[in-house]
Image (tube, rainbow, N blue to C red):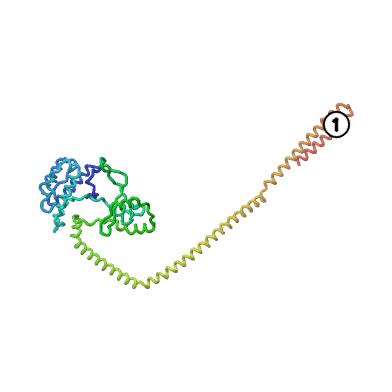
Amino acid sequence: NLKPFHRFYFTIPAANPNEQFYHFTTLFSWLLTKNDGGQFDTPGQFDDPNATVANMVAKLKDLELGGGGGGGGGDAITNIPLNKLKQGHGDGVLAVLLALVDGALWKSGSFAGFQRALHKVDEYAEEAEVDEDAEVTAEGVEEEQEEEEEDGVVVVVGKRAKRGGDDEGVDDDRDEVYVGAGAGAGGAPAGGDARTKAEDAGPKKVDLTDWRLEVERVTPLLRVQIPNDNKDWRIHLISASLISTRTHLQKLHTEISTQLEKLSSREKYINTQFEQQTDQHRILKDTASELKQKHVAASASVTELTRALSGISEELDAVKATMDDIGSGMTDSKPLVGVKQGVVKLKAEVKQMDLRVGVIQHTLLHAKLKTKGPAANEAHNMMQVKMKEEQHTTELTQCK
C-alpha cells in the first residue's frame, strides 16, 4: 500500500527520516519474502531502530546473498555498519536493496539462462560526454576552431598549450599553431617550409554560402550515437520477455481486430434496418427547423406590436388625464361661491362706510349749529329728522 518511490528516494535524506526508515524496512521485509528468507515483521513506531537493524543484518547472513547466481557481495553486505542502515539512505541501504532485488529476480527465474556479466576495469581514459541534441552552426564552428587548407597544409588553432623550459606544467592562454602537412609525391610529410607557409598565410576570404553548405553536410557526421552496452541487464531482461510479450500483443491485436469487425458489421446492419426511420427523422428535422424560423419571425412581429400597443396605451392615459382635469374644472362651484362671498363682504363694507359718513355729517352739522345760534338749531332739528329717516331707511334695507 505504499506510493511509488522515485529512483533517488534512498540516495539522499528525506524530509521525514522516520518515514524513510519505515519505507526501507517495509521494502526490505517484502523483498525478503521474495528471496524465500522467511517472515520479517515490519517494526512499529516505538521499536528500537538499533534492534531492527541488527535483525535485518542477521536475516541477510541467514539468506547468504551473493552465492550462486543471486545478488553479489553477500560478505560486503553483512559487513555494512549498522549506523548506515539506520539512516534509511545512503550507499549501505542501496547495496542491501540491490542485492535483495537481484536475488528476487533470480528466484523468480527472470534471469534464467543468463550469466552474470564480468565487468573489466577500463584502463583507457574516459571520453568527454557528447550532447547529441546540441546544434552545430556556422557561427559556433567559427568560434571553436579555425581551419585553413593551403597547399595541403592544415592549420588548427587551439587554446590549450603548455610552456616549456622552467615553466613546464603551467597552462598558457596563448594560441599554439599545429601544422600537419599533406603527403607529398612520395608520401613524406612536408617539413619546416610548410610551417612557415602556414604562419605567413594571411586571412583567407571564405564564401558564406559554401561555408554554410559545408556545415550542413558535416553536421550529421558530428552526431555521436552511443552504442548499446551488452553489459546492461535491462537488455537481457527485454530480450527474455520479448517473445512472450510479442505473442500476447499479437493475440490482443487479433482480438481487437475481430471485435472491431463485429462492431462495423453490426453498425451496418443497424443502419440498414433503420434507414426508413432515419429518412423520416431527417424530414421531420427539416420541418422542425422551418417551423422554428417561422416562430422566430412571429415572435419578432409580436414584440413590435406589443411595443406599439404600449405606446398607444400611454397616449390614451394622457388624454384621459387631460379630460378629467377639464371636467373637474367645469363642475367645480368653489370659484362661484368665493365670488358671492366677496360680494356680500363688499356690501357690508359699503353699509358701514355709509353709516360712518352719516355720523360724520351729523357731527359736522351739530358743530355748525352751535356756532350759528337759533337758526342753526332749526336746521339742526331738520337735519336730525332727516338723519333719522335715512337711518330708518337703512334699517329697512338691511332687514330686506
Q: Which of 158 and 62 is in front in this view?
A: 158
* Res. 349 visible in picture: yes
Density class for disc 1 (Cα within 10 Å; few <14, some 14-19, many ≥20) is some
- Residue 239 at what x, y percent from top left? 19, 60
Residue 35 lies left or right of residue 14; in this view the side is: left
Q: Residue 166, relative to residue 224: is it above or below?
A: above
Q: In which quarter of the image is residue 354?
A: top right
The quadrant holding residue 110 is bottom left
Q: Where is residue 282 in the image (x, y as percent from the top left)?
A: 41, 70
Secondary element at tag 1:
helix
Question: What residue sits 32% from the left and 45% below the top?
Answer: 174
Task: Report x, y in % for residue 103.
Answer: 14, 52
Identified at 34% across, 73% down, the residue is: 272
Q: Can residue 30 be seen in this view?
A: no
| Residue with the mark numbered 1 | 381
Is 212 positioned to the left or the right of 8 in the image? right
Residue in the foreground of this view, choosing between 176 and 190: 190
Query: Residue lying farthest right?
Result: 375
How many numbered badges does the structure rendering display? Answer: 1
Three-letter code, disc 1 = Asn
Q: Quadrant of the C terminus?
A: top right
Taking the spot 26% from the left edge, 50% from the top edge, the residue there is 128
Q: Position of residue 56 (x, y in %)?
A: 14, 45
The quarter of the displayed image where residue 229 is located: bottom left
Which of the pair 195/307 is nearer the observer? 195
Viewed as shown, does residue 54 lie left or right of 199? left
